[in-house]
Image: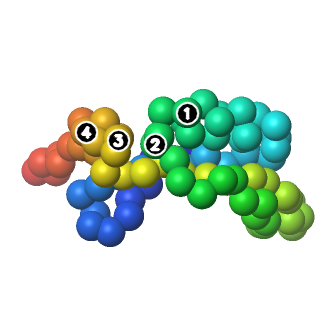
């Protein structure tokens, strides 16, 4: 799972990227039932430099405006730190 940003940068979403297709569709169905996802999962390819191999995965993301919790969580975790 990845907590990432869309435009504008103040809004965050949660992206799910896993190799297990059944698991991704299960999580998608649960989030879809409460209306926080849009498009269904898509198959994607992920290249790992360490292995030199390309792997198949499945991904989807949540809406940003319907789930302000993710933005709040991101702001709590990534606080500005004074480096003096």
Q: Distance between the residues labelled 1 and 3?
A: 14 Å
Say few, some or many: other residues with alpha carbon within 10 Å of mark 2 (under 14 / 14 to 19 / 20 or more). some
In this picture, residue 21 sits left or right of residue 73: right
Residue occupied by mark 1: 33
Q: Which of marks 1 and 3 is nearer the N terminus?
A: 1
Q: How far apart are marks 1 and 4 (CA)?
A: 22 Å
Q: Distance between the residues labelled 2 and 3?
A: 7 Å
Say few, some or many: other residues with alpha carbon within 10 Å of mark 3 (under 14 / 14 to 19 / 20 or more). some
In this picture, residue 23 sits left or right of residue 17: right
The label on residue 36 is 2
Q: Is residue 58 above or below residue 29?
A: below
Residue closest to the eye, 39 or 57: 39
Residue 79, how many percent across, how many down?
Answer: 21, 43
Q: Which of marks 3 and 4 is nearer the N terminus?
A: 3
Residue closest to the eye, 52 or 64: 64
Residue occupied by mark 3: 67
Q: Which of marks 1 and 3 is in front?
A: 1
């Amino acid at each position: 799972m990845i907590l990432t940003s869309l435009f504008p940068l103040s809004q965050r979403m949660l992206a799910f990227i896993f190799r297990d297709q059944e698991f991704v569709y299960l999580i998608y169905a649960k989030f879809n039932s409460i209306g926080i996802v849009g498009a269904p999962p898509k198959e994607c390819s992920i290249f790992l430099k360490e292995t030199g191999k390309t792997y198949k995965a499945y991904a989807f993301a949540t809406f940003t405006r319907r789930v302000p919790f993710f933005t709040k969580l991101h702001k709590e975790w990534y606080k500005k730190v004074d480096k003096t």
